Image: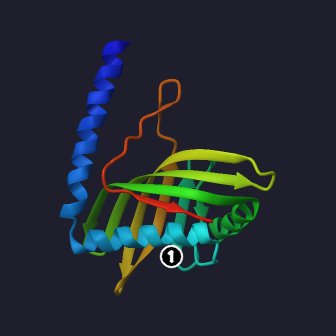
Amino acid sequence: MRKITRLLLIAGTLVASGAQAQAPTWSNEQAAVWAIVEQSWDAQAAENGKWPGDFTHELFVEWAANRFAPRDRETYIAWQRLVDGATDTIWHEITPLTITVVGDTAVVMYSARLLTENSAGESNTTVISLVEVLIRDGTSWEFLASSNFSPTYGSGTILIRNMGFRRQHGVS
């Protein structure tokens, strides 16, 4: 068991050191895509009505680990309004893992850690991994697809490391 733990720690360190080198070498396109991801999280946390409508393509689909099937854009927007009304985001941190841009298509893989509070005042911390596809429509990027899952291993140990370049955001 100690050897497995030690190997996991070494692997995590190697992954973390690789991710730290990624951010400074991003192309302008990768940086532009990540900026849209950051803006979308800021809009969602601010609950200003911009997320998801202003950021998603008309053919957007989303599939999360806790859903039995993907949701289309309109269904996703309706559920987001319901969730935004039931919980407040106190804090979020998003950490890019990979950003691949080919032509007018981008695939972004990243982790997110959220601290939320429900209407009863109970707080909850959630860690998720996300894979999102964005497309460029002219000069702007829009989300076309999103999928997320809980990064767990074995008995539920979360294998998320501080991956160098990351974004933290506190919401008051």
Indicate left or right for 149 with 71 as reference: left
Q: From the top left corner, tell me how far across and down residue 34 is, in percent.
A: 36, 67
What sort of colour scheme is used for the picture? rainbow
Please name the residue shown 43% across and 60% down the image. 132
Q: From the top left corner, tell me how far across and down residue 21 is, in percent.
A: 20, 53
Please name the residue shown 61% across and 61% down the image. 71
Amino acid type, callout 1:
Phe
Indicate left or right for 75 with 139 as reference: right
**35 or 98, which lies in front?**
35
Q: Quadrant of the N terminus?
A: top left
Give the quadrant of residue 70: bottom right
Give the quadrant of residue 161: top left
Indicate left or right for 44 with 103 as reference: right
Extreme-front residue of the structure: 172
Depicted 142 relative to depicted 82: above or below: below
Depicted 170 relative to depicted 65: above or below: below
Q: How many marks?
A: 1
For label 1, the residue is 55
Extreme-bottom residue of the structure: 138
Q: From the top left corner, tell me how far across and down residue 99 is, in percent.
A: 30, 60
Depicted 134 relative to depicted 58: above or below: above
**92 or 137, which lies in front?**
92
Q: Quadrant of the C terminus?
A: bottom right
Indicate left or right for 33 with 114 as reference: left
Element type at mark 1: loop
Q: Residues within 10 Å of mark 1 (few under 14, many from 20)?
A: many
Extreme-top residue of the structure: 1
Q: From the top left corner, tell me how far across and down residue 5 is, in percent.
A: 35, 21
